Image (tube, rainbow, N blue to C red):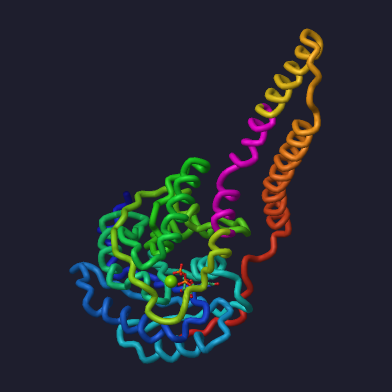
Amino acid sequence: MTDSTTSLQTRSIDLLVPCHNEEESAAALLEALNTTIQTFQQPRDFTIHFNLIIVDDGSSDQTCQRFEQLIKESKEIKQGSIISLSRNFGKEAAMLAGLNHCEGDACIILDADLQDPPSLIPEMISAWLEGYQVVNAVRHDRSSDSRLKRLSSEGFYSLFLKLSKLKVQFNASDFRLLDRAAINAIAACQERVRFSKGFFAWIGFEQKNIYFKRPARQTGSSKWGSWKLWNYALDGIFNFSTAPLRIWSYIGLFVTSAAFIVGLTSVIRVLFFGIDVPGYASLFFAVTFLGGLQLMGIGILGEYVGRSYLETKRRPHFVIKKITKA
Ligand code: UDP
Ligand code: MG
């Protein structure tokens, strides 16, 4: 743990909010942030300075203008910037754009829709002042999510844990406090296909969990459909584990051994017992089954080759259209 409780009089914290079409959420978010900061019992020896960083991830509505206006009117958040990306690059790229822009001693990433309640911020900061360098907000109750979403998420995390051997915090979203050292570590992870939940576990550090009940979205609708979530889960597994590749060596070994035994049995039956081997059904089964296995193997190989291809191009993760200071 670092000795965060000593020395400095003023500490600065960036509040990082990735946004895609969140004009409807903006007012409620700013109000909640202002209320939290106002009531926040600051430790006697510290003044905490909050800086709001909105990353407008290619919104087609008035997200940027709305936040600019609200930050100007805000009582508690006196400083903010809106980073407008040139198109919708996705939440992962938006978070990285925000992290690259953070200059504070720590940063708190939160969603715009109040599903990451700003009322938890004081507890996160207290844990940080105690010396924890990563503070994870973990959902102990996800009744606002559908049963299918909860079950698939549980299945994914247990598989991810087994394959990657990384202690990814189950039921934690991206709602976290990151100390400067943790921000630098995550920003240093330069891969194009990004899975932040993996990075949060991979960087290590002293981490603390605080628990909360996840409320339903206040306004607007979720930008994460089932297909997007499925692809995100694949990114997580293929980015942090090569086990799906290795498994094919074992499948190959098993199938070859089984084929050898079946072949040997057939030869023995013909030679010693003179029994004719009925061919059609077994041949059909063997050809289709092996064909399917090979296609699956090629598909998995393709997942890795495709990702390597994306990495080799070394394109930037996002393009910034403009930065508005408010
Ligand atoms: N978001 C973003 N880019 C996207 C999709 C989402 O910046 O392409 C932001 C969104 O505005 C919100 C956060 O990411 O602040 C979480 O998105 P959402 O609430 O749709 O996800 P869910 O809570 O349903 O998982
Ligand atoms: Mg949400």
Corner quadrant of residue 262: top right
Q: Position of residue 133 (x, y in %)?
A: 36, 55
Above or below residue 158? Residue 4 is: below
Above or below residue 131? Residue 48 is: below
Decide if residue 58 is on the left or right side of residue 78. Answer: right
Which residue occupies 44% across, 74% down? 17
Q: Relative to the observer, which residue lies in front, 90 or 319?
A: 90
Using the rendered image of the protein, determine whether residue 122 is visible from the camera's viewpoint. yes
Decide if residue 180 is on the left or right side of residue 283. Answer: left
Corner quadrant of residue 146: bottom left
Q: Relative to the observer, which residue lies in front, 113 or 42?
A: 113
Q: Give the residue at the far top of this rendering.
A: 272
Above or below residue 205? Residue 261 is: above
Decide if residue 215 is on the left or right side of residue 297. Answer: left
Q: Position of residue 66 (x, y in %)?
A: 46, 89
Using the rendered image of the protein, determine whether residue 203 is visible from the camera's viewpoint. no
Q: Relative to the observer, which residue lies in front, 260 or 64?
A: 260
Residue 4 in magenta stretch: no
Which residue occupies 68% across, 27% down? 253
Q: Position of residue 168 (x, y in %)?
A: 43, 49
Residue 244 in magenta stretch: yes
Where are the magenta residues, as a range? 231-253
Which residue occupies 46% across, 44% down? 161
Which residue occupies 60% across, 49% down? 238
